[in-house]
C-alpha cells in the first residue's frame, strides 16, 4: 500500500504538484530529521541537511528518474549529506556527544531501566561504524533489510549478517 502511495506522489511531484510534495515532506520529515539528528548535534545544521535531503530528492524526481523506494532514497541522500558534512568539517564526533544525542532521543522511553539505557548507549558507541549504522537503521529507524541495503549499498544478506554480528557484539559489550 505504501509503495503505491509513494509512486502516486512521485508521479504528482514530477508533474509539478506542490501539494503532493508537501504531503510527501510531512510524511517523511520526522523520520529523516531523527536519522540526521542522531548523527549531528547541531539543530540548525540538522534542519539544513533535512532541507537539502528533500531538495535533492525533489530535483531527482524533477529529472524524471524512476524511484523504486522513496524512503530508501531519502535515507541514502541524508546519509550522504551527513558524510559530506563530516568530510567538510574534518572532525570526528566524540563518544560523549553521540551518547548525549542518543539519550536526548526517545530511546529512554523504550527502555524501562535507566542504567540499562546508559549501558546500551555506551556499548553502541563502541560498535564498529559498519555495525552501528546497520543496528541504528534496523532497530532505531525500523527499516527493512532491503531498505538498508539500498541506503548503504550492500546486499540485503550482507545487511542481515552485519545486524546479527552487531547485535551479538552489543550483547557481549553489555554482558547480557
Image (cartoon, helix red, strand yellow):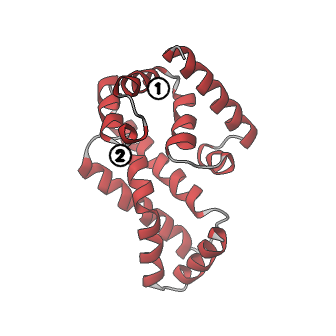
Q: Position of residue 117 (x, y in %)?
A: 39, 28
Classify residue 50 as left or right of residue 140.
Answer: left
Q: Which residue shows up at 59% across the image and 55% down it?
A: 72
Total marks placed = 2
Which residue has dot 2 on it? 37
Q: Which residue shows up at 41% across the image and 24% down it?
A: 116
Q: Position of residue 163 (x, y in %)?
A: 63, 32
Viewer-closest of 124 and 152: 124
Instruction: Specify the quadrant of the image occupied by residue 121.
Output: top left
| Image height of 44 relative to 27, above or below | above
Viewer-closest of 153 and 114: 114
Which residue has dot 1 on it? 124
Classify residue 105 as left or right of residue 65.
Answer: left
Q: Tell me the element at label 1.
A: helix
State the residue lying farthest toward the right: 157
User: Is disc 2 surrounded by few (<14), some (14 to 19) or many (20+) residues within 10 Å?
Assistant: many
Amino acid at each position: 500500500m505504501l509503495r503505491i502511495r509513494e509512486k502516486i506522489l512521485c508521479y504528482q511531484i514530477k508533474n509539478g504538484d506542490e501539494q503532493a510534495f508537501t504531503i510527501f515532506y510531512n510524511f517523511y520529515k520526522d523520520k529523516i530529521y531523527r536519522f540526521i539528528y542522531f548523527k549531528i548535534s547541531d539543530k540548525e545544521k540538522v534542519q539544513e541537511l533535512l532541507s537539502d535531503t528533500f531538495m535533492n530528492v525533489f530535483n531527482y524526481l524533477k529529472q524524471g528518474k524512476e524511484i523504486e523506494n522513496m524512503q530508501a532514497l531519502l535515507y541514502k541522500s541524508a546519509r550522504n549529506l551527513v558524510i559530506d558534512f563530516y568530510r567538510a568539517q574534518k572532525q570526528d564526533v566524540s563518544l560523549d556527544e553521540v551518547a548525549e544525542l542518543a539519550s536526548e532521543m526517545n530511546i529512554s522511553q523504550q527502555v524501562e531501566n535507566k542504567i540499562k539505557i546508559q549501558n546500551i548507549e555506551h556499548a553502541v558507541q563502541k560498535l564498529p561504524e559498519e555495525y552501528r549504522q546497520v543496528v541504528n537503521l534496523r532497530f532505531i529507524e525500523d527499516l527493512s533489510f532491503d531498505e538498508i541495503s539500498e541506503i548503504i549499498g550492500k546486499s540485503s544478506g550482507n545487511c542481515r549478517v552485519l545486524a546479527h554480528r552487531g547485535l551479538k557484539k552489543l550483547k557481549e559489550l553489555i554482558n547480557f
